[in-house]
Image (spheres, rainbow, N blue to C red):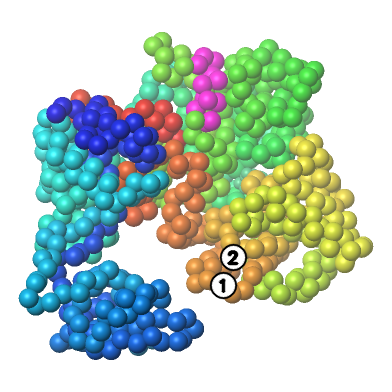
Amino acid sequence: MQNLHKVSVQNLRGVGPQLAEKLKKLRIETIQDLVFHLPLRYVDKTKISPIGSLQPLTSAVIEGTIKACDVVFGRRRSLVCKLQDNTGIVTVRFYHFTWSQQRKLRIGTKLRCFGEIRRGSSGSELYHPEYTVISDDFPIALDDKFTPVYPTGDGITQTRIRRLCALALAELDNNSLIELLPSYAVKEYSLITALKFLHNPPVTTELHILATGRHLAQRRLICEELVSHQLSLLQLRQKIQRHPATSLVEKLEQRDKFLAQLSFKLTPAQLKASAEISHDMTKPTPMLRLLQGDVGSGKTIVSALAALQAIANGQQTALMAPTELLSAQHRLNFENWFKPLGIKIAWLSGKLKGKARDYQLNSIADGSAKMVIGTHALFQEKVKFFSLGLSIIDEQHRFGVHQRLALNKKGVSSDVTGQTLKQLPHQLIMTATPIPRTLAMSLYTNLDFSVIDELPIGRKRIETTVVDSSRRAEVIKRVAAACVSGRQAYWVCTLIEESESIAIQAAEVIANELKLLLPGLDIGLVHGRLKADEKINVMNNFRDKKINLLVATTVIEVGVDIPNASLIIVENSERLGLSQLHQLRGRVGRGADQSHCVLLYNAPLSHAGKERLRMMRNTNDGFKIAEKDLELRGPGEVLGVRQTGSMHFRIADLSRDAYLMSEIKVLADQLIDNNPELVEHLIERWIGKSQEYVQA
Ligand code: ADP
Ligand code: MG
């Protein structure tokens, strides 16, 4: 058979439209998809393990003679057999059993069992193993292969998916699946041998190596997949950079004047990042730069400098923020900064309607508004720019990749994929998530990087304490004391059970409770269900110190900057990931005052919960926190699910395989130089049509 990626699974025996539909949910549509659908793990039923050598948390086949079998009345009634061979004794336990079972499992009977070994109170135990009664007269053969366990779902049994994979493998030959890596990249395993091996590893294979994902056959496929992703990112960068962009020259005089009117001096790190950005913008090709800096490091002002450069060249700048609150805050800041310079600002929010909206749209279209600020609303069809020279995206991890692409397409022209090379805007992407190097290499290889690696001088380390929620009363006293002394505080109610509405309810309840307990304070409430202008109103009151204590849901999680707030209480902190806690904590520590963060938790803490909170108490360093989060919860948590969700890996796992990235980078460059004809094929095989969305 030829070209397995074009042959539908329905060509396999026994696969009709119904099953094909179910397989589609597993992203299996072609025979090639099945061939790349690899086992999650393998079960070894090929040999009998001596009872004395059993290790907890492994699965094993054992044989032994029943030495005792009794119904035991513990916390739960169970049937307990003692099984012995000449190396040791093990407990086999059934919580559900029938009378006939009990009768069969008599002393002296020989059993073969298969199951997972656990550590019980009296040594190794197996719960509800598969078992057969055996006798020396009628030996039963053992399996001669490992049993693969495949990812599956929705009414497709293991047996079925195993059979389908076997059928697909039978179609596999050099014509049906072409080797795409050149010989210098293929060491031990060719593509086909690696695939065959992994569906059906020979019994001599060490399963514990396969479990780590580092077997050479696995590496062969992981490398091909990662290199293909790498190539697709590089190719997108090339495609974008083939387009011209307006060269935006530096206007130092205006820049210096602007800096002079600020109440602070930029840090060396801010100046360096700004210089890198500025230099990119002078080029006649589109900038693609990621500005990374921990929460509170002062990215906004750096983006304002970039905007100023574009505007000084007669071009428009668009700044997109992920929430209404944040876009409103940016509007305030940019108005303060730019109005004195006579720069008109347009602000587009989703809620803006009718005439007011038309007015904003017109001033964007006729070019009179040079600075355009908004949320997702910015890339709706109706928004037409007069001459967009720079697009800035704040808190990029909150946006899906295609949303960013859409804003870029708003350039002086549009279509990235079009035939004629039209002009594109420069693009600056900002993130407060420090991205571990290996992840950056795999996801953002097509972007240039600037890093702000220091906080403005005078900032103090935020003191973090972890407090059992049974001690709320003390925490409330502390909040009262802080507010009475003129400081401001946040009280954050976070999601419980994934339900926003429960979090909102909790916030309402707490706001009322605190109002009763602290009648002398002005207490505000902000959450996602308020109308946009109500939210912004509350925030402005907080900013203007008309509110002492702001009870909030996680709507304030990103970007909100109110330097006088110096205390934050986070409820249910044990349920949150490290990166999210770090973002929330970053709402304070933005001024010169000593700031504090109180993480309330509900006992008892899980081991992982304890570890996370300890980490938060011990470090303020966003980089260390992101690396730990990557280790604990994977890239989806660090970068935002939307971000990584659009990058679907079949075999590779970014956190597990990060160690391969330098090798992959070299290989990608080699392929581009030596084998450009293979690049398209690799991208087609591993990424296919989703390519466009992978642009970072
Ligand atoms: P983030 O990097 O988290 O987006 P912001 O841009 O919101 O940080 O800046 C945080 C706060 O620090 C703001 O109030 C901003 O005005 C202030 N700021 C920025 N740069 C400096 C600096 N060099 N010195 C003092 N304060 C600064
Ligand atoms: Mg910010």
Identify the residue at horizontal 71%, vertical 60% (top origin). Answer: 568
Residues under numbered marks 1 and 2 in contact, where contact means CB atoms less than 8 Å apart: yes
Q: Quadrant of residue 147?
A: bottom left
Query: What distance separates the C-alpha of mark 1 from that of mark 2?
Result: 7 Å
Per the image, the residue denoted by label 2 is 574
Q: Quadrant of residue 59?
A: bottom left
In the displayed structure, 587 sits above or below 367; it is: below
Q: Quadrant of residue 312?
A: top right
* Tag of residue 605: 1
Q: Horizontal placement of 538 versus 591: left or right?
A: right
Q: Is mark 2 within 8 Å of ligand 1?
A: no
Which residue is more in the foreground, 134 or 580? 134
Q: Which residues are magenta?
A: 403-414
Q: Is mark 1 within 8 Å of ligand 1?
A: no
Identify the residue at horizontal 7%, vertical 76% (top origin). Answer: 137
- The residue carrying pointer 1 sits among few (fewer than 14), some (14 to 19) or many (20 or more) residues within 10 Å by Cα, namely some
